[in-house]
Amino acid sequence: MTRQREQWGTRLGVVLAVAGSAVGLGNFLRFPGQAALNGGGAFMIPYFCALLLLGIPICWAEWAMGKYGGRRGYNSYPAIFMLLGGRPGWRYAGVIGLLIPIVIYMYYVLIESWCLGYAWMYLTGGIQLAAEGGQYAEASRKFFNEFVGATQDGVMMHGTVHTSVVFWMITFAVNFIIIYHGIARGIERFCSVAMPLLIIFAIIVLIRVLTLGTPDPAYPERNVLNGLGFMWNPKPLRAGAAWWEELANPQVWLASAGQIFFTLSVGFGIIANYASYLRPKDDAVLSGLTASATNEFCEVCLGGLITVPAAFVFLGAAQITQSLGSTFALGFHTLPVVFLHMPLGRMIGAIWFFMLFLAAITSSLSMLQPAIAFLEEGLNLGRRASVAILGLLTALGSLFVIYFSKDLVALDTMDFWIGSVTLFILALIEVILFAWVFGAQRGYQVAMEGAAVRIPRLFTFVIRYISPVYLLFVLIMWCWKNAPQQVSRFREPVPMLTLLVILGTLTFLMILAHVAGQRWQREGVEAPAEYGFAAQAKDKL
Amino acid sequence: MTIGGWVFMLTSVGCVTALVVWCFYRILTRPEGTEDIHAPLEINTHDREV
């Protein structure tokens, strides 16, 4: 390897970067909705079980995999998979670790730009909701649909450049400027400022929400305490049942496992890439735990106390219940109405949406780095060429989503097949590779090297048996519940075209992985001899 | 807000806050570059023996 190795600058820097990758819109918009819909406070029991048995063990496994690849000079998923699996064919499975962040980036950067656009509009005059007969929720929905072009395909590119496309271009450029500066000078430096700022902004909004009292005397029941109660009171999903009876309901366990999975960024193809830039003796265990804990803090302590109580106080239970299941409905339809009624609402709206933008950009940056690493080490390209190729690929994909904007069908299709189903598949492959092919004991040794805290020995048992079974259960149930509806949509042209875009990207990456693999074999991917098994790995290559 | 709601909210928020504070305390108080020493410190290297 002749390339200069990139590394994180500080321990705190890597923690903030990984936490930034995990903290996103889901922490503030998806979690509160899922919790309120699935038992309120009772949701937290399966939620913490999933965190301990699924989230943190897989997170540690991904950190260990990345660290293992990094000490041999490899940072991309195909190379790390090839090293761990000991066979060249594993690199094709590793391609999924490139496909997921690239495709998610194509639509996520668009959502990110909406947050920036909303923040700008609040800052420069607020979002004027021209409601007829006090129908603010409908006016807010209409405003959002026009802003994102959900009314018609191609509306964003007709004639003049649409406002939201301008924000997309700014967001897209900012992402690539930061990523161009590399790990320490780009991602780490940005996240070291953005993450503390994000938490400060969220605390400002939290204080505003908790001091609202009873803003409308005409509705005395709409107060902050009842808002917190709507979110946190344990409640059954079915009328007449006790809340604890719902703990036997698979729907609650599925929702909580899904939330933990999405929130920690496990299975995204990101954590192992970030961890590969650690120095050989750097700690991975405490860093991984801290990044997960920071994500949980943003989700439970900030998201859990802000979004639903604020919406309840101004709109009441009946109006917000229908938007709880949708991130967009809660974030872009309901909350603008809340800010319209809230004292200092314009300022709080600007802070809130800029905070969401920061949460989103720290995540989108992490989606670009795995592919950059692959292009650099797989094809021996320089940073500039890698950034240019990835920029072109993601811009084309993102423009596709912008063009086919009607009812956000293209975005939804990508989100379901790549942002949900493929995540579970990659996580399952990772767990099998780490715990069964590489070996849980060896993985434990890798993780513990330089560790600041000890992983309980139970980890090896959990990662071998409990995590894969839990994952398989969630994957099957998730597909059982959602896939039929998504498959039936392939009769329409836009979902089918979206599938072709995904398959085209996958094919392109497979070809690159094939070429890269031949190069790595010529180089001779080093055998991990110190763990006593891999002399065989080199022989097999 | 019911007592159950208070219990779930305070327990969840309290546990997560305690965990994040403990983690950052450990991260920030551990000197940069510290490596775990896997061998006993009292090894006699005999480098002073004639």
Image (cartoon, coloured by chain):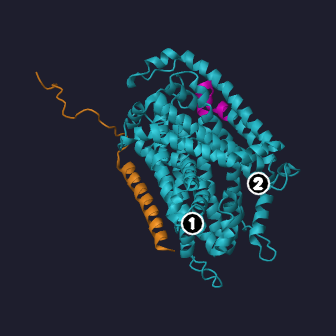
Chain colours: A cyan, B orange
Residue A387 in percent (x, y) is at 66, 35
A527 vs A302: above or below: above
Q: Secondary structure at mark 2?
A: helix
Q: Nearer the viewer, mark 2 or mark 1?
A: 1
Query: Within the magenta stretch, is there residue A101?
Result: no
What residue sits right under mark 1 in the picture? Answer: A306
Q: Residue furthest left?
A: B50
Kind of residue indicated by mark 2: Ser
Residue A266 in percent (x, y) is at 54, 43
Residue A90 in percent (x, y) is at 57, 26
A481 vs A68: above or below: below
Looking at the rendered structure, which numbered label has been put on residue A164? Answer: 2
Which residue occupies 69% across, 58% down?
A328
Which residue occupies 81% across, 52% down?
A406
Q: Front-most of A483 and A157?
A: A483
The magenta region covers A371-387
Q: Front-most of A4 and A226?
A: A226
Query: Within the magenta stretch, is there residue A384?
Result: yes
Q: Front-most of A462 and A65?
A: A462
Q: Residue furthest bottom?
A: A217
Please state if A194 lies on the left or on the right of A106 as rendered.
left
